Image: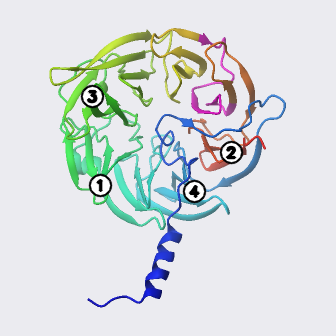
Amino acid sequence: MKRLPVRLIFWSMVLVSSTITPASASDWPQWRGPNRDAISTETGLLSDWRAAPPRLLWQKTGLGSGYASVAIVGDRLYTMGDREGQQMVIAIDLATRRELWATPIGQIWTNRGGARCTPTIDGDRLYAIGTHGDLVCLETATGKVIWRKNFQRDFGGRMMSGWGYSESPLVDGQRLVCTPGARDAMIVALNKATGETIWRSAVPALGGAGPEGAGYSSIVVAEAAGVRQYVQVIGRGAIGVRADDGRFLWSYTRIANRTANIPTPIVKGDIVFVSTGYQTGSAALRLVAADGGVRAQELWFLDGNTFQNHHGGVVLVGDYLYAGHGHNNGIPICVELATGKVMWRAPRSPGSGSASVAYADGNIYMRHENGQMTLVAATPQSYEVRGSFRLAHVDGPSWPHPVIHDGKLYLRSENVLMCYDVSGR
């Protein structure tokens, strides 16, 4: 075989390396951050907004319609939006705010809202799910489609109700894991390089209040009861399947409702926390080994009047859960994970509508549906607001989750991306 000249090999390596964005400790490469828990490890951030709120650094238009949040790796930001009659995955250079590429992956979503998925970045590959069930793998450098699947066509998938797929796919080792929602393929694991099916997880008839199909949640990984497993909330409620082969392990249907099961589960050790809105409630489960499998034991349940998270998510800081409580509401609340004890609940919401949350440097970042952004101390002792401001641009419900990266707060509002300085410098 003919050998390539050393100079050609060198310049080929330079070209390839220049198209791959390097990762850093502060990266936010997927839905709810590095560990899917909405926690940023950054420090030295602004700790009090009361005297002076964060400064708006810039705005960028052109993202299209959608409730998708953003993923950031190195100097590139990725999101999704409906525009030009198509649903797009979009890459933006943060240094110049220039759009690098936009790849159409499927039809727009006309039943309110547009794209919902936050892309998942894994090295030089990106994975995203369209509202019509289009699953794609793209090159991060160019946006070129490497492989694609469709949940309905390839797996017989279905949603529990009519707002379209909203999941952000999970990369776990060599597997790409997602939720088509079919009875014999509720969750599937695909080879992330080729899209070939590794396994399909069949879920038995579970009963309960919820309908069949996928929910609006995203999968998390648990090392619980001695088994590596994927935890997800589907139409029928919370389930766990074994990571190795997709074997169904356990279910918990009490937190399912008939309309939309949305928040992403939270896992700490053998404990799983789940919540839904529509007056349903919240629960903590302990996963235990039983009969060669896993059983979910209810530790506690709080009804919808006590604690329900409609959407916007929940963040666990230490031993305490922080969230917005209420259906179509985001009343700040703190609950002890081990016991379900409500440590505090605000007398009223700083903003109106549901609140999406993230944590960084001792504080909870709460973004309310009406565009009010609030900083709340992450302490179980008392409810303490450390400042609030209204977003510079509000277009429809402010639902996309906040992202903290490199001392900056990124907030999407439909067609507009806002960047605020929270560095404390």
Q: Which of marks 4 and 2 is nearer the N terminus?
A: 4
Point 37% across, 21% down: residue: 257
Q: Looking at the image, can residue 43 be seen?
A: yes
- Number of other residues with Cα within 10 Å of mark 4, as a class: few under 14, some 14 to 19, many 20 or more: some
Q: Residue 149 carries which label?
A: 1
Point 43% across, 21% down: residue: 275
Residue range (magenta): 344-373
Q: Which of marks 1 and 3 is nearer the N terminus?
A: 1
Residue occupied by mark 4: 74
Near-viewer residue (367 or 88): 367
Q: Earlier in the sequence, mark 3 or mark 2?
A: 3
Residue occupied by mark 2: 407
Q: Which mark is residue 226?
A: 3
Q: How far apart are marks 3 and 2 (CA)?
A: 38 Å
Q: How far apart are marks 4 and 2 (CA)?
A: 13 Å
Q: Earlier in the sequence, mark 1 or mark 4?
A: 4
